[in-house]
């Protein structure tokens, strides 16, 4: 492996370093998360973005085709020969007039970064390609993850396409949408359904992977976040390398928000950008740990010494009340985000804010996204609902340039979408009413017609 890259504990008072060949999910000295660090002086990274643009003309090379590895020079932790890519990151940034209007912004100010176009249908492939590369480089034969669905779909896909490793995935019982479960099963992953929720599965998979020596690809893995930095590189690329005013992203395990903060810190350190955007992380109200800790209880990065008492007290309360995460946005149905500290650091770097949005707001925003032609799954729409809230609060100005990250594809969770648009009140109540969703303001209801030509024609004329 390259010696210009190493791992380092994120706690500045510890800062223990480890080689990139080591497999760790935490610092051995203090238990904090780890970063992948590069010696930029020795690496001499590109001094202009043109360098990456030129790779577009060489898309016959797998590393130039990949939207992750096109930026290899900004995540050079493994030799090029060991990079594993299946063409991830071919995603797009689309300005959206309809969503912009819904959010309350002036025309042309809201963009949607559509990560649903990844091979497994979510942004997780950006990170998986990087973690998988590391796993392959150190000779792993099995890889595991706990998942609300998309990480497992992604891992299962990389395993089945490359045949380099076997996938072992852990999911909470009854907590995964069919779209995601179907991927893991179809791609042939060993699928363990644990009697519990994501937080339980996460705790177990950490134990099991360390006991059995299985490579862990959850976002506690610092290499995964290296791949997810490239989402921001592509956003900048699509904006002709201009930094937007806001990045709005749903927050679950907080890997993405953490990776985005690192991406902007590094670009500024290298000198490729001279300012960073502001970051808004959006929780679902039913899984709002970050919102509660950051906005209500004042938890901050505090130069690398976040106040543990605040977090311990909050988690103690969750346990005492047996409070479980609960939201229709299953991908962010997480109460104990593993990347909390890194996210606090990102919020510090990017003058961040955190908001919570209800399942009602999420589904209405999702319908607006769908009406604009880029369907997304419920969790993704939290970014749009969050942007709307921040505009209404005057935090985001109507002239600012805002990028909402659409993290996953619409077909990941058809149950939620169909229940929103349904005419069947029973189905609506079962799937959404139980979540406190009262109405479907933007429902596009199917019209029931008898199988008779005249009636069908009449109905079309009536409704179109
Ligand atoms: C994983 C996931 C999230 C949450 O991202 P984090 O990095 O864990 O905060 C949001 N949306 C979708 C669709 C996801 O798959
Ligand atoms: Zn440490």
Image (spheres, rainbow, N blue to C red):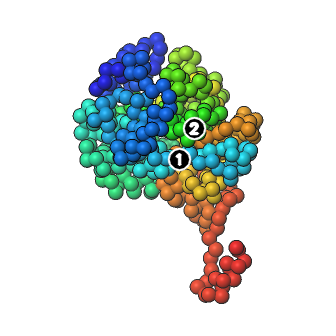
Q: Which residue is label 2 attached to?
A: 240
Question: In the image, residue 290 lies at what x, y percent?
Answer: 58, 32
Position of the C terminus by quadrant: bottom right
Which of these two is toward me, 224 or 198?
A: 224
- The answer to whether the residue labelled 2 contacts the one labelled 1, judged by CB atoms less than 8 Å apart, is no
Drawn side of residue 387 relative to residue 273, left or right: right
Q: Which mark is residue 76?
A: none
Q: Quadrant of the N terminus?
A: top left
User: Which residue, as the protein is rendered here, is positioned at the far top?
Assistant: 13
Q: Can you give x and y, in whole percent of width and height, for residue 64 in the image?
A: 39, 41
Kind of element beneath mark 1: strand
Residue 183 position, x and y percent, is: 39, 54
The image quarter containing residue 85 is top left
Which picture quadrant has residue 73?
Answer: top left
> Depth check: 354 or 229 in front?
229
Residue for point 51% across, 39% down: 234
Which residue position is annotated with label 1? 92
At horizontal 57% and vertical 38% (from top left) the residue drawn is 240
Asked if residue 243 lies left or right of residue 37, the reply is right
Say few, some or many: other residues with alpha carbon within 10 Å of mark 2 (under 14 / 14 to 19 / 20 or more): few
Task: Identify the residue at horizontal 28%, vertical 35% (top origin).
Answer: 81
Is residue 199 among the parts visible in the rendering?
A: no
The image shows residue 289, relative to residue 442, as above or below, that is above
Q: Secondary structure at mark 2?
A: loop
User: Percent from the top left, x then y, of residue 100?
Assistant: 69, 47
Q: Residues within 10 Å of mark 1 (few under 14, many from 20)?
A: some
Identify which residue, 13 or 463, lies in the foreground: 463
Q: Nearer the viewer, mark 2 or mark 1?
A: 2
- The residue positioned 74% from the left and 44% from the top of the image is 106
Using the numbered discs, state the Cα–Cα distance from disc 2 to disc 1 in whole angstroms.
13 Å
> Where 425 falls versus 192 (above or below)?
below
Q: Give the mark, 2 or 1, whose residue is nearer the N terminus.
A: 1
């Amino acid at each position: 492996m390259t010696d210009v890259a190493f791992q380092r504990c994120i706690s500045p008072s510890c800062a223990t370093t480890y080689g990139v060949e080591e497999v760790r999910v935490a610092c051995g000295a203090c238990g904090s998360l780890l970063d992948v660090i590069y010696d930029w002086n020795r690496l001499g990274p590109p001094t202009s973005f043109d360098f990456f643009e030129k790779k577009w003309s060489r898309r016959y090379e797998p590393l130039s085709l990949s939207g992750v590895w096109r930026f290899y020079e900004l995540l050079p932790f493994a030799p090029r020969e060991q990079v594993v890519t299946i063409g991830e990151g071919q995603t797009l940034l689309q300005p959206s007039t309809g969503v912009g209007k819904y959010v309350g912004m002036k025309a042309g100010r809201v963009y949607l970064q559509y990560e649903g176009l990844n091979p497994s249908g979510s942004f997780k492939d950006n990170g998986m390609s990087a973690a998988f590369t590391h796993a392959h480089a150190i000779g792993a034969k099995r890889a595991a993850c706990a998942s609300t669905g998309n990480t497992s779909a992604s891992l299962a896909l990389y395993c089945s396409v490359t045949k380099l490793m076997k996938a072992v995935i852990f999911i909470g019982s009854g907590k995964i949408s069919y779209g995601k479960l179907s991927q893991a099963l179809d791609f042939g992953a060993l699928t363990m359904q644990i009697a519990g929720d994501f937080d339980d599965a996460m705790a177990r998979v950490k134990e099991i992977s360390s006991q059995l020596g299985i490579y862990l690809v959850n976002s506690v893995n610092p290499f995964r976040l290296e791949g997810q930095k490239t989402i921001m590189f592509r956003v900048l690329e699509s904006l002709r390398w201009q930094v937007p005013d806001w990045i709005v992203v749903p927050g679950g395990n907080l890997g993405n928000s953490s990776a985005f903060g690192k991406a902007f810190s590094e670009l500024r350190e290298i000198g490729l950008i001279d300012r960073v955007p502001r970051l808004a992380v959006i929780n679902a109200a039913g899984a709002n740990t970050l919102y509660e800790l950051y906005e209500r209880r004042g938890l901050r990065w505090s130069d690398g010494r976040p106040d543990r008492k605040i977090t311990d007290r909050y988690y103690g309360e969750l346990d005492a009340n047996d409070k479980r995460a609960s939201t229709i946005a299953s991908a962010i149905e997480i109460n104990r985000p593993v990347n909390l500290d890194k996210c606090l650091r990102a919020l510090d770097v990017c003058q961040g804010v955190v908001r919570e949005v209800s399942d009602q707001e999420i589904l209405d925003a999702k319908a607006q996204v769908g009406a604009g032609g880029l369907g997304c799954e419920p969790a993704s729409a939290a970014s749009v609902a969050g942007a709307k809230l921040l505009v209404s609060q005057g935090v985001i100005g109507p002239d600012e340039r805002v990028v909402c990250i659409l993290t996953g594809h619409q077909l990941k969770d058809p149950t939620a979408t169909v229940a929103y648009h349904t005419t069947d009140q029973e189905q609506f109540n079962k799937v959404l009413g139980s979540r406190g969703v009262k109405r479907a303001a933007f429902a596009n209801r199917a019209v029931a017609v008898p199988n008779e030509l005249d009636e069908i024609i009449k109905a079309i004329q009536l409704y179109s």
